[in-house]
Each structure stands twice: as structure tokens, then as C-alpha cells.
Amino acid sequence: MGTVPPRIAGPNLEQVTAIVNSSVSLPCDVHAHPSPEVTWYKDSQALALGEKVFFLPESSVAHGVVSRGGRLQLSRLRRAQAGTYTCVAENAQAEARKDFVVAVLGTSAFCTLPCALPPSQALPPLGLTTAPAAVAPQIRSSGSMQEHSVLEGQEVRLDCEADGQPPPEVAWLKDGGPLGQGVGPHLRFYLDGSSLVLKGLMASDSGAYTCVAHNAAGEDARLHTVNVLVPPVLEPAEFQNDVTVVRGSPVVLPCEAQGSPLPLVSWMKDGEPLLPQSLEQGSGLQLETVGAGDSGTYSCVAMSEAGEARRHFQLTVMDPPHIEDSVHPAELLLTPGAPLELHCDARGTPSPNITWHKDGQPLISQDRKGAGQLLLVEAVQVGDAGLYTCLAQSPAGEVEKSFRVRIQEPPAISPSPSNLTLTAHTPASLPCEVSGSPKPLVVWWKDGQKLDLRLQQGAYRYSAGPSGRMRHLGRGRA
């Protein structure tokens, strides 16, 4: 919407006549956009609003044009208050003025105040019975502001006892506007005499409630400030009490406090203070890099004059599995029938689950007592040789350690013919199939003399195959 220069309702000059000790109200209804600043002057001097002169704000919104004005209330008039009062409304576009010429008479008149009397009007004859003089309203203890702090959902009573002649009518405003427009549909309110009772209060009902008492002689007002207290509420409503993280990881414990007034939030760990109370709170408690010592019970405490709320977290810091150095070497050499013990000292939080594998396959043999950290084979055989692996697993991770087990097997020669008959000048092959672990060294002898198979021996050449077979290649030349 565009700008609207100030415009004051009514003529630019009004004559107002009143009597001593009465009250008079000078209306200055201004229409403008943006909202203007309204200033009052008396005889060209800026008016200092004091005990006997005060300003009652009025406002309304219609068709998108903000109309703001003011009403100057002159109470218990004296002759010195006569003069020219000027209302000046000014915004960024322009300004508007309106003058009120106020005359204060020293005797009573026959009109209901405020009134404007022609200067030529005569006073009534002596002895004529007159109506009681009008008295402007006066609210008891109107000079003091009342503050009320009420818990959400409860009720409050705002008193407004006013005296005046004729008896004044009482109206209520909220934050400067009519009461019905300033509250939500949930609020129930009613008048108990001149007092206002508010029921079912919510946080949005906090504000300034003004009691205005008015009659023909003038107005008086009293301000009540209502603060609706909302007990602390912790967000988010759904959260995980048990929190488990791996050592070295960051963690956030969510706890954001809402309420009116804003609660003070503090943190405790295992019942001891961790962080002091503070209004500067984030989304929760943040721990950048957790260690084993950070495990424990954390409590978020939100407190205000409206109440208290608590939230608890059980933080468990997991230590990934690790295997301590073992006294056993990574490679073992045993003889058949010897016992085998393999230790796997795996640690972590929570305690890891330990399983054993042999050559990549789970170890489930009945002859092996593989339970937990110790693998025991009471009497090893040749078939027990292989690669043994200890695997430690937990939700925090896994780790493994391997052992190479070798079993010594005594050398053995497979049976073969011991007597051979050969034709002269033909090749011959003498079988010698051997087995054992580690692989045996094969040595050949002839007539009690050790043969060096790498060299020619006399008139013969020999070679040894992988199995220890010796071949006679034939007679060599002299």
C-alpha cells in the first residue's frame, strides 16, 4: 500500500469551554500511513505529560490504512490551564495540525462536561435548583501499575473500581485495542462488576490490559500487566535415553528448553554439576571427542519461576576391540602328541565376542577346547597344522590375530623292491619315496660310501628326482 499523509478529523480549530476542577478531553483522530508521530503543544510549547495531563492512545486498522491518533485528557482543571492546545501529527510525507482553544470558567455551568458554551450564554438565576455537578471518573490506585504473574491455564482477576458523577462506564483494552480483538478464542473472560476475570490463560495472553472509566466529565485509566507463566518444556519430545557411541566420536545430547519466562538450563553428570545455569543454550550438550571417562548419566535441568523439567541420558562410550601382545610367537613348531595353547587376550567396551578359525573356516572340532580367549588342543596331530585366527568382534568394531602352527612329522620311506636285476649298459631307476615335515633331506649311499649326487662318481652318473629316486644314466667314458 502507498503512503498517506496525515489527516486529522474535524475542523482545524475548535473552541472548548470548561469550569474549574472539571475534566475535558481533546480528541485528535489521525489517519495516515505510515503511522505518524503525534505531539501535543500548549501555547506553542511542547507539552510535558504529567500527573494532571495524560495521553490515551487509540488505534485501529481498516482497509489496510493504519489510523492512529490520540486524546489529551485534562483533569481537575485550573485557570492556568486555559490556552491553545495544538495536536501535531507528522510522518515522512507531511504533517497536520489542529488547535483547541480552551477557556476555563470559575463558576459552575448547567451543561454536562465536556461542553462548549457560547461566550454570550448567561448564568442561571439565583435560587434555581440545578443538577448535581459532573465529576470526572477516578479509578482507585490509578496511579500505580499492577503486575500479575499467573501460571498457564489458571485465571486472574483485574480490579477496576472507579468513582465519578454520573457513575462512569468501564471499558477494557488489551495492548491498546478492544479486548475482544486482542485475545485468542481459547480465552474466556467476563466482567464481575467493574473487574475483569480472565480464564484459561495461555502465553499469548500476556500483555497490557487497560481499564478505562469514562463519563460525561472525562476519563481515567489504569494499567494491568499480565505475565502468563509457562512451565519449562524440553524439546524434542521424542528422544533416545540410551546413547552408545565409539570412542573418539562426537555426540550431541538433545535438550532445548521452551517456556515463559525462558528457563535457565544446566547440565549434570552422575549427579554432579557439569555446566552452570545459562540462558544461552543451543540444541543440547555437545561433546566433540568422547573418551571412556565420558560414560555416565547426563541430566538436563530447565528451571524457571513457572516450574522445572528434567531429562536424563545414559551415555556409553564403546572402546573398539584390541588384542594384547601374546607371549606366543606368531609361528609355532610342535611335535605330534604335544599340547597346543593359543591365547587371544582381546579387550574392549563392551567385551568383544571371540571366535576361532582354522584356514579360514570356523573351528568346531570336538577335540579342541576353543572357548573365549584360550584355544587348547591336548595332543596335536599332523592334521592340526595350519593357520589359526582369533577374531574379536563387538558393536564398536572387530580385530583379528593369526598363528601359524606347524607339526613335525618324522621322515618315512615308502616300501619298494629292494633287489633289482638289470641288463648291462641299460638305465636303472632306484625308487625312494619319502614323507615328513619339515621336508626330509634325502641322502644316498653305495657300499657304505655316501654318494654326492651332484658329481660323477667313478664310471657312473647319477641324478636325484624330487622323491629321492636315483637314476643310473649309464657308463661314462674313460
Image (cartoon, grey):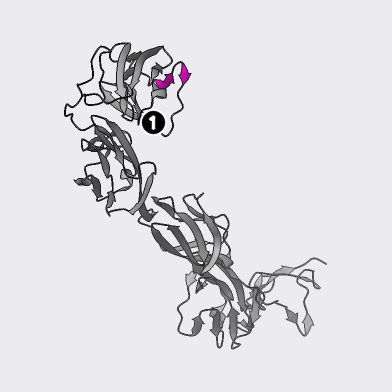
Amino acid at dot 1: Phe
* Quarter where residue 218 is shown: top left
**Quadrant for the C terminus in the image:** bottom right
Q: Is residue 455 left or right of residue 145?
A: right
Q: Relative to residue 152, is residue 111 drawn left or right?
A: left
Q: Residue at x 21, y 46 (%)?
A: 189
Closer to the camera in the image, 413 or 427: 413
Residue reaching furthest to the right: 478
Residue at numbered disc 1: 54
Q: Residue furthest left?
A: 129
Instruction: Please say whether residue 175 is one of the residues in the magenta stretch.
Output: no
Q: So how many labels did they put on this image? A: 1
Q: Position of residue 183 (x, y in %)?
A: 26, 40
Identify the magenta region: 35-47
Q: Residues within 10 Å of mark 1 (few under 14, many from 20)?
A: some
Quadrant in the picture for the N terminus = top left
Q: Position of residue 446 (x, y in %)?
A: 75, 81
